[in-house]
Amino acid sequence: MVTTAGGGAPPVVLIGLMGSGKTTVARLVATALGRPMRDSDDELEAEHGLSAAQQVARHGADLLHQREARQLQQALADRRAPVVAAAASVVEDPACRAALAGAFVVWLDAPAAVLAERMRDGAHRPHYHPDLEKMLTEQYQRRARWFSQVADLRVDVAESSPRQAAERVLAALPGSG
């Protein structure tokens, strides 16, 4: 449920597993709305000088996930009501799940096999297991209940293009008509 202080437009937050298209769809939605776009991967790489995969290799997944949670909290505090491509891990953090109540949250969802295929070329993403489909299936099993809990909208991105997903998001936004 979206609740915003002062009645302003809420931030739009895209969640989902790696490879679901959060960055691409967020960029399209931000452009359409004329809002700033904030991307967890880009911001954390700019701040720490390492991709998410490099951060995991050097410092471990726990530190990366703490940084991702902090980045989401900072993005949600942005008064410009940004469109945020959030790290998948943020739904595991109870404080992040609570903070998402003030945003319009969109879960970009697809089967693990589809996401694994998309991830094969993404060296910037951490591969916690050599079998990407198995890794994503395990992440899905752990996170799906939280994705479902916080999402205002679920978009199946297995068969839809990023532009189609963005159009669904825009059509579902509060006040869109």
Image: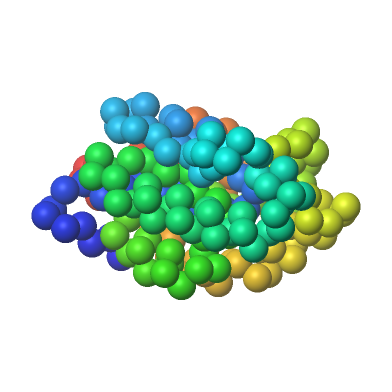
Seen from the viewer's position, the closer of residues 36 and 112 is 36
Height in image: 98 above or below 49? below
Number of numbered discs overlaid on the protein picture: 0
Residue 36 located left or right of residue 130: left
Q: Position of residue 128 (x, y in %)?
A: 78, 56
Structure colour scheme: rainbow
**Quadrant occupied by the N terminus:** bottom left
Residue furthest right in the image: 130
Q: Position of residue 140 (x, y in %)?
A: 67, 63
Q: Residue at x 37, y 69 (%)?
A: 98
Seen from the viewer's position, the closer of residues 82 and 118 is 82
Residue 21 located left or right of residue 94: right
Q: Position of residue 10 (x, y in %)?
A: 26, 50
Height in image: 146 above or below 8? below
Seen from the viewer's position, the closer of residues 47 and 32 is 47
**Quadrant occupied by the C terminus:** top left
**Residue 91 visible at all:** yes
Picture quarter containing residue 30?
A: top left
Q: Residue at x 34, y 33 (%)?
A: 36
Residue 32 located left or right of residue 67: left
Height in image: 137 above or below 173? below
**Residue 115 visible at all:** no
Q: Position of residue 94 (x, y in %)?
A: 46, 72
Picture quarter containing residue 83?
A: top left
Residue furthest left in the image: 6
Residue 171 located left or right of residue 51: left
Picture quarter containing residue 145?
A: bottom right
Q: Residue at x 71, y 58 (%)?
A: 60
